[in-house]
Image: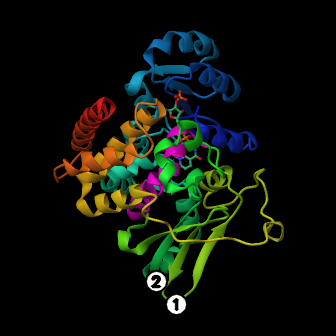
Amino acid sequence: VSILGATGSIGESTLRVIAEHPQRFAIAALTAQRNAEKLIALARQFRPTAVAIGDETQLPGVRSALHPLGIAVFGGATGIAEAACIPADITVAAIVGAAGLIPTMRAIEQGASVALANKEALVCAGRLVMEACATHGTRLLPIDSEHNAIFQVLAAEHRAAVEKITLTASGGPLLRRPLATFASVTPEEAVNHPRWSMGAKISVDSATMMNKGLELIEAHYLFDLPASRIEVLVHPQSIIHSLVHYADGSVLAQLGMPDMAIPIAYTLSWPERMAVTTPRLNLAEIGALQFEPLEAARFPALGLARAALNAGESHLIALNAANEIAVAAFLEGRIGFTQMAEVVERVLAETPTTSIGSIEDVLAVDESARQSSHTRIAAATLA
Ligand code: NDP
């Protein structure tokens, strides 16, 4: 198993699952961006063939720690892409953001399996990613809990009878907070997710519900369904992870406690299942499951994502890039909570509809949207 983004939240959960099955798994490559200390500790524990550190200033330190152990060490963005080419039966794509796109594509080109957490790669290059999987015979196994749930209950032989799918959403930390106070939401409040423990970016995305927008786009590509057949339902307890509605009126759902080790273990053992230490679901104890419609006015990001999906690929790339820049600015205290959606909306408004033929085209639109976002944020900060 290779893990791209091994030092993050998904990387950690993946290694927790792997550590339970030392006879079954060995580590091929591990990558990190900045956290050299954690990467070295993980490499000492799991003894991969190779590691890569994105931040090249840390390369000498990682080299001197790991070369004596016979572990190859790569550096920079190209080094991470190189690590993604180390032969592995399955690569866990768990880098955050569009930065994961190239390494994920390199892993796909190896023709083995890719367990995908890095939803932004699908948002900004979904068609190209799916085409590359078809070309190289690579199986894409979704880690995102909602998509993993659908993957678990979507029987291939019943594919034609799928009417629609429902992605469940916990509603994040701001579900019950008065809308009038949203402008004053702090980064600490936004990352304080009631159900899931995750990296900072996806936690903010969950608070704005942009995460559900990104997941809508992810589901569109993974399951080849139009946005009109993908619904979102708020389910604060995060026990039902998603549902598939069939033409005969049957609805199939996957349930489980909110712990990413569950979907990760499913991708690592697929098509089998394996034992893993996770909290067990006790419905008698939970008593009742709640559902409610999503209030669109509270969470404009979901509408922006739906509109971008209808507008075309350049809008999806711009949506993702603008959101990444806006989230970073919010976390650094440079813009307020409600300004994130405003930045994305303005950048989308000035994004032309262009045709996307290659990853280079994706990167060009991504870069231009990042520049526009910086300009917008600078203007917002001065205003
Ligand atoms: P984290 O922020 O916890 O971890 C991100 C990982 O990516 C770290 O290993 C980090 O390295 C690395 N990284 C950061 N920037 C770069 C870069 N520019 N180039 C290469 N590597 C980089 O994120 P999560 O684990 O929470 O999320 C990872 C992905 O999984 C995201 O796409 C997210 O949407 C998705 N996901 C996460 C879930 C969760 O429960 N956390 C659930 C479902 C999906 P370093 O530590 O050195 O900075």
Q: Nearer the viewer, residue 339 or 98?
A: 339
Q: Residue at x 52, y 61 (%)?
A: 147
Q: Residue furthest front?
A: 180
Q: Residue at x 28, y 46 (%)?
A: 318
The verdict on residue 206 being magenta is yes
Tell me the element at label 1.
loop
Q: Nearer the viewer, residue 20 or 277?
A: 277
Position of residue 83 relative to residue 181, above or below, is above
Q: Position of residue 122 (x, y in %)?
A: 39, 51
- Which residue corresponds to mark 1? 248
Q: Position of residue 344 (x, y in %)?
A: 32, 47
Please rate how many residues cluster around mark 2, counting C-alpha atoms within 10 Å: few if below 14, some from 14 to 19, many from 20: few
Q: Position of residue 324 (x, y in %)?
A: 39, 40
Q: Position of residue 260 (x, y in %)?
A: 64, 50
Q: As shown in the figure, which amino acid type bears the numbered disc 2?
A: Ala
Pointers 2 and 1 in contact (CB under 8 A)?
A: yes
Can the viewer see residue 106?
A: no
Give, as a single range, the part of the protein colored magenta: 198-220
Q: Nearer the viewer, residue 66 or 278?
A: 278
Position of residue 176 relative to residue 240, above or below, is above
- Confirm if mark 1 falls within 8 A of ligand 1: no
Q: As shown in the figure, which amino acid type bears the numbered disc 1?
A: Asp
Q: Residue at x 48, y 38 (%)?
A: 95
- The N terminus appears in which quarter of the rendering? top right
Q: Nearer the viewer, residue 318 or 295?
A: 295
Position of residue 282 relative to residue 363, above or below, is below
Q: Earlier in the sequence, mark 2 or mark 1?
A: 2
- Confirm if mark 2 falls within 8 A of ligand 1: no
Label number found at residue 161 = 2
